[in-house]
Image: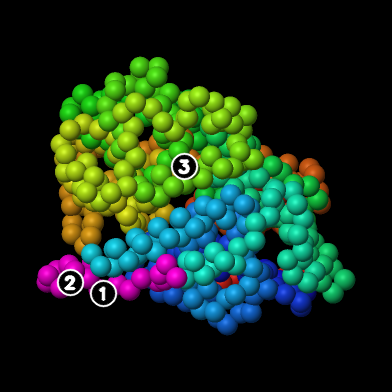
Amino acid sequence: MINLEFIGAAKTVTGSKHLIRTSQASVLLDCGLFQGHRKESDEKNRKCLGQDIKLEAIILSHAHIDHSGALPCIYKSGYRGPVYATPATRDLCLPMLLDTAFIMKSDAEHINKLIMRGVKNLERVEPLYDEKDVVGVLSQFIGIPYHRTQNIAPGMNLTFFDAGHVLGSAISVLDIEDEGQKIRLAFTGDLGRKHLPILRTPEAPDGISHLLMESTYGDRLHEPIELTASALAEVINRTIKRGGKIVIPSFALERSQEIIYELKSLFEKKIIPPIPVFVDSPLTVKLTEIFKLHPECYDAEAFALLHGEQSPFEFPGLKYISSIEDSKKVSSSPEPCIVISASGMCEGGRILHHLQSTIENEKNTIVIVGYQAENTLGRRIVEKRPEVKIFGKLHRLAAEVCILYGFSGHADQNGLIEFAESIRKQGHLEDLFLIHGETKAQVVLKMKLRERGFQSIEIPGPGESLRLV
């Protein structure tokens, strides 16, 4: 008996959790936070797995919070087993999870102060976990390099392959044997794109019989990165011309480094004028340092740059900000500049303060460079709603909104189809499960895959359980 249960990232893009059960063991693929409506997400995250399940192991595809952010929750609830990840993912998770705990604490304190001052329609907030839970779960991590096979539970062997999405991201391949039945299952986590800066192209493991594939951009195509960089230059130039600020909500891991990488090129080629660039994220500073420790994840060009005389993450006019005081100065200054700040979906952190100070001024521009999940502030900005709520207060959306999905670290429709076809050519693919996508994107991708001869394609819903053999 080999069963697969879809707990999170099923017909949605957050809260990645998928449970594999055999007669001998239960193993969890990813342990991510749900993001969206504060109350609904909080309830889901506090339930963690939603039931009393004895786990032998957790496998982590990469360090993004929608894949790793609930690990301290599960530790807090009593889990003391191993968490398997690549060495880069292990190193990234410490600052990322500590930052998440800090943001939870800070946001809770801010909202609770507003309640004490008499602001209506707000509910008190308690952090999901604290720094002790983060340190505790990090002590359970076991780093496994790419292509090294490790037994993780009775009848289960794990091998990581490069997913090309963020530093250390992995496609998890499980060779499972139970009651005389054998399968070779691959879980993509988030699948990257070919020919992006810094990282290598995603690998396609062979011999796969069951594939869990993300589908975030299953209904659309990305522009080439070169065209996206040109579009970024255009929006920067026109915003500077009208005397405004450019605010870029960005994931601290990978997306921020890629934006910095592109800005350096635009400045050096004099495509945009020299103006201050502030990376207002202590986490991004820490993660950029970790990048330098893991050359095993770079493509050849990034490897040469990172070990040459000029870092791709440094240039004149670029300043990394850590202190709250400096952050406040940038937020309150009317001078034209570029601000890159987390979180990428505008659900917490310093980006909220920058948006609060710029969103009502038509001179300014908000540049969206990553996917925005349903019910997040970032999604409401993408939808260009007349008013959006920040820290419980409505603000008029007057700033220009520019959407540049070409910077996305996710494979687009063509990339997903090409990956699935590579898996099929190299093995005996029996079942394909579309996860980590909204229903519209999944339905379109399923139709495209059917046109190419894929037969057994499932779009599982949250809580659905399927028997594989």
Q: Which residues are magenta?
A: 111-132
Vertically, is 126 above or below 256?
A: below
Query: Which residue carries the number 2 mark?
Result: 115
Q: Is residue 357 visible?
A: yes
Residue kind at label 1, given as amino acid type: Arg
Residue 117 belongs to magenta span = yes
Q: Residue furthest left?
A: 118
The tag earlier along the polypeptide, 3 or 1, is 1
What residue appears at the point 80 percent right and 69 percent down from the top-left corner?
A: 155
**Label of residue 192 in the image:** none
Measured as percent of width and height from the top left, residue 204 is found at 71, 44
Instruction: Find numbered disc 2 in the image and state the secondary structure of the residue it sits on.
Output: helix
**Label of residue 124 in the image:** 1
Question: Which of pointers 3 and 1 indicates the residue nearer the eye?
Answer: 3
Nearer to us in this view, 227 or 219: 227
Q: Residue furthest bottom?
A: 52
Residue kind at label 2, given as amino acid type: Ile
Q: Residue furthest top?
A: 270
Q: Is residue 371 visible?
A: no
> Is 346 left, or right, of 254 in this rendering?
left
Callouts 3 and 1 close, C-beta under 8 Å: no
Q: CA distance from mark 2 to mark 1?
A: 7 Å
> Is 64 left, or right, of 244 in this rendering?
right
Instruction: Find numbered disc 1 in the image and state the secondary structure of the residue it sits on.
Output: loop
Residue kind at label 3, given as amino acid type: Thr
What residue appears at the point 58 percent right and 27 percent down from the top-left corner?
A: 304
Of the 4 image quadrants, the one containing the C terminus is bottom right
The tag earlier along the polypeptide, 2 or 1, is 2
Query: Which residue carries the number 3 mark?
Result: 288
Q: CA distance from mark 3 to mark 2?
A: 37 Å
User: What secondary structure do most residues of the magenta stretch adopt?
Assistant: loop
